[in-house]
């Protein structure tokens, strides 16, 4: 049963059933509960009126609800109809049906340029409205729809001999399951004009490719066979158009070792894979010679929706030759730079390293590539690093043209080395220059200055305590982590502090008067043995058992002591160097301390104050 009949019958059945149940149940209830006939008659009337009133209200609500639903449906249909009409107008779309002849909608008549009198027309009339060149094809397509029920989709021009602009229409149609034939009519003039413009644009681009002598363009079908070959391709690769057309890409211009790889990559792309990257590549001319090109590729569909591959190649052979010469020159220059003993340095405008030659690793102990990107100043002693950062900033900002000076490089092993640094600002705002190790020269220069100052002090007859303290400070300046003390031996073979500018008073008091005996601290042992003693770690060295607590409280963890002697070879005192961490001296450290120990011996022997009279309150 149809839904439009079933729903009313169901409602009617429910109403009849509920009414019968009401009447029967209410009558039975009255008969069982009321014995007075007059009262029973009145209640019967009241019961009937209640049933009528309830039924009326139910019918009212049902009718009202039905009206509301119909109103909503009517408004929705009106809205959809307006939207459909608007969509048809926007899409220039009309509709039609076929019942022995065509029945056109008002929109379709407007597209055909006909009035309402042509709302129904025959196939012959429709063909008469179309351009003569289109009539035969349209007739065959419509006959296939009417007879064979094949879907109709064909474009045709209207016959408008007096109009300059052509109107193109797309006629579509189909047959539904009930055998009804219907379809649409759409204005596709704009699409046709766009297609014509695209063809003209492609033709212009083809002419442009033909007329560009340095832009070699080739087109290939899905089998990689040449379908297009411009004059620049002939000039670049040596093949004429007749020789190239129909040949495969890899057989023409790809070197033999790379042919399989190129063919595989292009096939993968044509089947939907990722496109090959544009870039430089060596290809092959007709005579077998190599030509370097920058090649880019694009994929498009032809008129039959078949993929076509286009390659655009630019000859860069001369560029590659110049590049090879430049690389050879750079390699020669780099080889020269890498053989230099001096460190070649380049930084950005902020002083961050971006080039170092191998001499950097030999000097600093740091691996070159690990140092790149770090500030140059980071590799210097803190005070020098601050000074260097300020000077680099001044050079980078143009406040000074260059910098040149001596700085203390802090090596990877914690040693300080004096270097001479030169930096100059370049046109690209980067800094470049050199870093030369002049540690030995600087130490000799400082030693000479210390010797000259000592001779001057002796000549001026300055107090021995002041001379020795100046020596300590001079040595500490050359190696800031170092703290120096000088002790002189009296006639009772005890050592007394003559100078210790940076040792604490408590530690000075603890070691003053130390006996010059074996295994008694570094100075006592050195004075007794007459030889250098090195204690790398005071916390574990056996000679420091009596002074370990005092040294730890003073922050001292390593000590080297050298004796200095008079002209007869007798020990007259010691020079000790202390460090705030366990440390072993280098050969340069020992040499430097030895030179200053000799100066201390010279001062002790030629000072107007006798060594034996030096007391511990110095």
Image: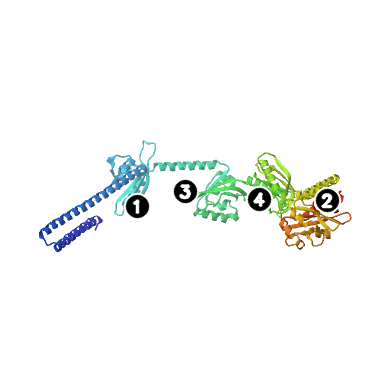
Name the residue carrying label 3. 302
Marks 3/1: CA–CA distance: 27 Å
Secondary structure at badge 2 equals helix
Q: Position of residue 328 (x, y in %)?
A: 69, 48
Nearest the viewer among 615 and 389 is 615
Mark toward the viewer: 4 or 1: 4
Secondary structure at badge 1 equals loop
Q: Position of residue 478 (x, y in %)?
A: 76, 49
Secondary structure at badge 4 equals loop
Name the residue carrying label 2. 599
66 vs 31, left or right, is right
Marks 4/3: CA–CA distance: 54 Å
Q: Earlier in the sequence, mark 1 or mark 2?
A: 1
- The 10 Å Cα crowd at callout 3, few under 14, some 14 to 19, many 20 or more, is few
Mark toward the viewer: 4 or 3: 4
CB under 8 Å between callouts 3 and 1?
A: no
Q: Position of residue 264 (x, y in %)?
A: 54, 56
Q: Earlier in the sequence, mark 2 or mark 3?
A: 3
- The 10 Å Cα crowd at callout 1, few under 14, some 14 to 19, many 20 or more, is some
Mark toward the viewer: 1 or 2: 2
Name the residue carrying label 1. 150
User: Which disc, if any, is residue 372?
Assistant: 4
106 vs 486, left or right, is left
């Amino acid at each position: 049963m149809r839904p439009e009949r079933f729903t009313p019958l169901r409602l009617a059945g429910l109403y009849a059933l509920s009414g019968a149940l009401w009447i029967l149940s209410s009558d039975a209830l009255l008969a069982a509960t009321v014995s007075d006939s007059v009262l029973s008659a009145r209640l019967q009337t009241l019961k009937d009126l209640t049933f009528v009133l309830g039924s009326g209200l139910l019918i009212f609500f049902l009718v009202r609800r039905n009206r509301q639903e119909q109103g909503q449906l009517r408004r929705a249909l009106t809205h959809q109809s307006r939207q459909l009409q608007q969509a048809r107008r926007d899409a220039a779309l009309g509709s039609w049906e076929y019942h022995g002849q065509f029945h056109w909608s008002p929109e379709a008549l407007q597209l055909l340029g006909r009035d309402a009198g042509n709302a129904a027309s025959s196939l012959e009339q429709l063909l008469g409205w179309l351009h003569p060149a289109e009539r035969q094809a349209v007739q065959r397509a419509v006959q296939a729809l009417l007879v064979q029920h094949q879907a109709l989709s064909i474009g045709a021009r209207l016959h408008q001999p007096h109009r300059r602009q052509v109107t193109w229409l797309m006629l579509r149609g189909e047959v539904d399951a009930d055998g009804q034939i219907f379809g649409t009519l759409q204005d596709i003039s704009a699409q046709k004009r766009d297609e014509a413009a695209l063809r003209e644009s492609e033709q212009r681009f083809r002419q442009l490719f033909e007329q560009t002598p340095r832009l070699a363009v080739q087109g290939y079908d899905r089998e990689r066979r040449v379908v297009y070959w411009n004059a620049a391709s002939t000039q670049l690769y040596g093949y004429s158009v007749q020789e190239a057309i129909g040949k495969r890409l890899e057989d023409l211009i790809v070197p033999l070792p790379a042919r399989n790889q190129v063919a595989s990559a292009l096939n993968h792309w044509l089947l939907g894979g990722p496109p090959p990257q544009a870039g430089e590549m060596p290809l092959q001319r007709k005579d077998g010679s190599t030509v370097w090109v920058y090649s880019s590729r694009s994929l498009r569909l032809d008129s039959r929706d078949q993929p076509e591959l286009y390659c655009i190649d630019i000859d860069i052979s001369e560029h590659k030759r110049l590049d090879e010469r430049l690389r050879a020159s750079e390699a020669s220059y780099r080889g020269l730079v890498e053989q230099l003993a001096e460190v070649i340095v380049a930084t950005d405008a902020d002083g961050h390293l971006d080039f170092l030659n191998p001499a950097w690793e030999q000097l600093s102990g740091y691996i070159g590539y690990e140092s790149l990107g770090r500030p140059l100043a980071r590799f210097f002693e803190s005070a020098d690093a601050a000074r260097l950062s300020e000077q680099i900033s001044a050079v980078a900002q143009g406040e000074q043209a260059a910098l040149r000076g001596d700085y203390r490089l802090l090596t990877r092993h914690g040693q300080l080395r004096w270097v001479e640094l030169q930096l100059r600002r370049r046109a690209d705002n980067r800094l470049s220059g050199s870093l030369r190790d002049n540690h030995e020269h600087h130490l000799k220069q400082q030693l000479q200055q210390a010797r000259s100052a000592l001779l001057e002090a002796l000549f001026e007859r300055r107090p021995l305590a002041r001379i020795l303290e100046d020596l300590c400070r001079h040595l500490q300046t050359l190696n800031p982590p170092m703290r120096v003390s000088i002790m002189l031996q009296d006639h009772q073979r005890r050592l007394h502090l003559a100078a210790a500018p940076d040792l604490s008073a408590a530690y000075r008091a603890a070691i003053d008067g130390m006996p010059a005996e074996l295994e008694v601290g570094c100075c006592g042992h050195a004075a007794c043995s007459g030889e250098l003693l090195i204690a790398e770690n005071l916390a574990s060295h056996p000679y420091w058992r009596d002074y370990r607590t005092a040294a730890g409280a003073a922050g001292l963890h390593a000590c080297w002591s050298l004796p200095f002697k008079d002209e007869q070879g007798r020990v007259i005192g010691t020079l000790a160097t202390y460090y705030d961490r366990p440390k072993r001296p280098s050969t340069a450290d020992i040499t430097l301390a030895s030179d200053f120990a000799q100066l201390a011996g010279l001062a002790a022997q030629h000072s107007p104050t006798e060594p034996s009279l030096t007391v511990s309150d110095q």
